[in-house]
Each structure stands twice: as structure tokens, then as C-alpha cells.
Image: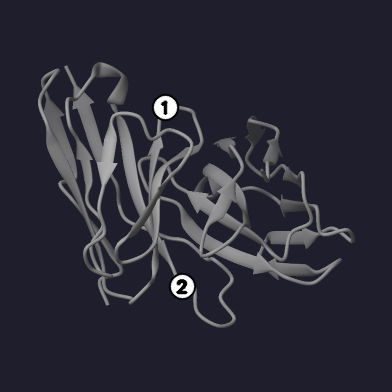
Amino acid sequence: GQQVMQIPQYQHVQEGEDFTTYCNSSTTLSNIQWYKQRPGGHPVFLIQLVKSGEVKKQKRLTFQFGEAKKNSSLHITATQTTDVGTYFCAGPTNAGKSTFGDGTTLTVKP
Amino acid sequence: NAGVTQTPKFQVLKTGQSMTLQCAQDMNHEYMSWYRQDPGMGLRLIHYSVGAGITDQGEVPNGYNVSRSTTEDFPLRLLSAAPSQTSVYFCASSYTGQGAKNIQYFGAGTRLSVL
């Protein structure tokens, strides 16, 4: 079945540093989704990428979808303490289902 | 819209007790699912449903039962709780109609401790 892998598992940065997490799928994806889970919270949908090579920005967050539609990345410029949490990527399978990566947990030291 | 509502928010059980975690959504989503998340871990799929009357197993179904009698509700039953079931449980739903992209909407979670 489809597998979605994320690296790194953990990332500790100083406030102001950049952060990147990478997502790789074993199969070609129709789209890739990114979610954020704040500590003690639940995953919340951030964005979806659909087109090959697509790049989308949300303020300091930049999301990319690979040309082959099998990998994606999330880059945060100049991290802030509000960026802490776990970032998940997910790829759709069928009938409403999505396969989630294991997530990258970001901690930011002020 | 309330979205996805889970009850209770917290629960403590003794080994061997049974209980039902409730999940309801008001978005008319056909697809619903249950995940468990252990400390520092990702989301593991327990059971899912593609519509009323249809359920299927995820990757960690043992010890859990589900049913889907209505579109809105998808309860998760623990028949005989074990300490290994101590976890945070999330219910999620998604739209499966035309143009659907499988975006998952999560409930706030139920934090379960089994002693």
C-alpha cells in the first residue's frame, strides 16, 4: 500500500532560524496535504497542493510539490515561537481516506 | 457548523472496563475515521467508514469495534480496555463527493488513560 515518509522526525531551532520538513511518497499522489498540530491540540489542515511543481506560500510558510508528484516540502522562514508543533503531510488514497506521514515535530528556542 | 465533535475529552478506565468514544460531524461527510496517537508518535488508523453501514479496518484495529448507523455518527468501542490502549484518540471526517481532495477535519480528541 501507499507509504508516506517524513524527515526529520524532530527539529530544534533557535527563533529566527529557518526550518524545512520533507515528505516522500512511495506512489504518485493526486495531491498532497499539510497539517499542523499544536502541542496538546489536534491536526488542522493548512494547505493542499495539486499540480506538479506547484509552490504555494502562506506568510512565512512555503509549500512545494515535486515535479513527479511523489515528494513535497514545507519551509518556514525565520521561525517564531508560534510555529512550534508537529507538521504532517498526507496523501489521499481512495474514498475519502488519506495516508499520513509520521510528522516532524518543531521546537523553537526563544 | 460545529465540525467534528468528540466526547468525552478525557477518560480514565480500569483494565477490563468497556466504553464508547463518541464522534459526530455535521458536515454531511461520507468518510469518517478513527486514529490513535501515542506520545511522540504519528497518527495510526484504527477503523474507517466510507458511508452509513460500511466500516473497514485500518492498521491497528485489534481491541476496537465501530459501527456506522448514520452519516453523522461514528462511535468507537473499547470492549475490554487494556493499558496498551492508553492514548489520544482522534476522529476525522472528509468529503468524498465530486472534486473531493480528501481533506481531513479532525475532532479535538479524547485523552484516554487505562490503569
Identify which amino acid the numbered label 1 is placed on.
Pro
Q: Is residue B8 depicted above or below B113 in this figure? A: below
Q: Which residue is drawn at 30% across and 69% down?
A: B3
Q: Name the residue under label 2.
A: B95
- Secondary structure under tag 2 reads loop
Q: Mark 1 points at which residue?
A: B39
Q: How crowded is mark 2: few (under 14 residues within 10 Å), some or many (20 or more)?
A: many
Residue A46 location (% of width, % of height): 56, 63
Q: In which quarter of the image is residue A18?
A: top right
Tag 2 subunit: B
Q: Is residue B47 depicted above or below B13 in this figure? A: below
Identify which amino acid the numbered label 2 is placed on.
Tyr
Q: How crowded is mark 1: few (under 14 residues within 10 Å), some or many (20 or more)?
A: few
Tag 1 subunit: B
Q: Using residue B85 as the reference point, say whether residue B95 is left or right of it.
A: right
Q: Using residue A83 as the reference point, say whether residue A38 is left or right of it.
A: left
Q: How far apart are marks 1 and 2 (CA)?
A: 29 Å
Q: Using residue B32 as the reference point, say whether residue B15 is left or right of it.
A: left
Along the line of sight, the residue nearer the viewer: A28 or B113: A28
Q: Which mark is residue A41?
A: none
Along the polypeptide, which appears first: circle 1 or circle 2?
1
* Residue A24 can be seen in this image: yes
**Comparing labels 1 and 2, the label whose residue is closer to the camera:** 2
Is disc 1 in contact with disc 2, using a CB cutoff of under 8 Å?
no
